[in-house]
Image (cartoon, rainbow, N blue to C red):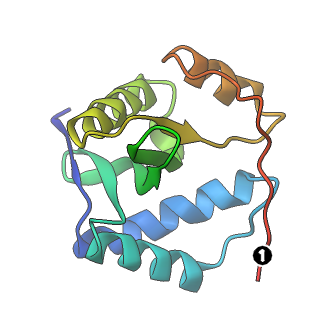
């Protein structure tokens, strides 16, 4: 299979939205909403200063995606990234594609001069936690808190 990882473009939107639907169906906190997912994707694609979406394609089909959202850390004195929405299409899992995509996301963040890469995963998703730990991610002593409007 001929594979490539690139930055998402608007013509990738339908496949990306479908991947997010699958991701949020599995999530314990979020509920799929195609309209909201498309709006979020468009906002990221159209504003690369806020974030970028990497897509893993094989033979022209999107096999997986990961979002990198950017911020500034006053603690670190510079740019940081939040890794969100990482998913491999259900028909292509357990083939090493997640490792390939995450490895590229880490390199991409470093190339963008990010000083830290943070992610959230479900607290009870041991396979995901173990997966991320293989790449050097560690559990934080901080806990996420949210105020949703």
Q: Is residue 116 above or below residue 43?
A: above
Q: Is residue 106 above or below residue 47?
A: above
Q: Visible in this render: residue 89? A: no
Q: Residue at x 49, y 42 (%)?
A: 91
Q: Residue at x 41, y 64 (%)?
A: 16
Apparent side of residue 56 relative to residue 66 in the rendered image (left or right): left
- Residue 135 x %, y %: 48, 18
Quarter-of-image position of residue 35: bottom right
Q: Is residue 16 above or below residue 103?
A: below
Marker count (numbered): 1
- Residue 113 x %, y %: 26, 39
Q: Residue at x 44, y 56 (%)?
A: 71
Q: Is residue 96 above or below residue 101?
A: above
Apparent side of residue 32 relative to residue 71 in the rendered image (left or right): right
- Image quarter in which the N terminus is found: top left
Apparent side of residue 74 relative to residue 77 in the rendered image (left or right): right
Q: Visible in this render: residue 124? A: yes
- Residue 42 x %, y %: 37, 78
Q: Residue at x 54, y 75 (%)?
A: 37
Quarter-of-image position of residue 20: bottom right
Q: Nearer the viewer, residue 89 or 78?
A: 78
Residue position for label 1: 148
- Residue 75 x %, y %: 53, 40
Badge 1 element:
loop
């Amino acid at each position: 299979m001929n594979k490539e990882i690139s930055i998402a473009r608007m013509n990738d939107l339908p496949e990306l939205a479908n991947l997010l639907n699958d991701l949020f169906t599995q999530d314990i906190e979020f509920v799929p909403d195609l309209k909201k997912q498309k709006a979020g994707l468009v906002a990221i694609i159209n504003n690369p200063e806020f974030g970028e979406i990497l897509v893993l394609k094989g033979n022209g089909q999107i096999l997986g995606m990961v979002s990198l959202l950017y911020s500034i850390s006053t603690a670190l004195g510079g740019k940081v990234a939040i890794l969100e929405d990482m998913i491999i299409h259900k028909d292509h899992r357990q083939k090493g594609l997640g490792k390939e995509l995450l490895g590229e996301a880490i390199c991409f963040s470093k190339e963008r001069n990010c000083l830290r890469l943070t992610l959230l995963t479900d607290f009870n998703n041991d396979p995901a936690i173990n997966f991320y730990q293989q790449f050097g991610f560690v559990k934080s002593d901080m806990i996420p808190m949210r105020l949703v409007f």
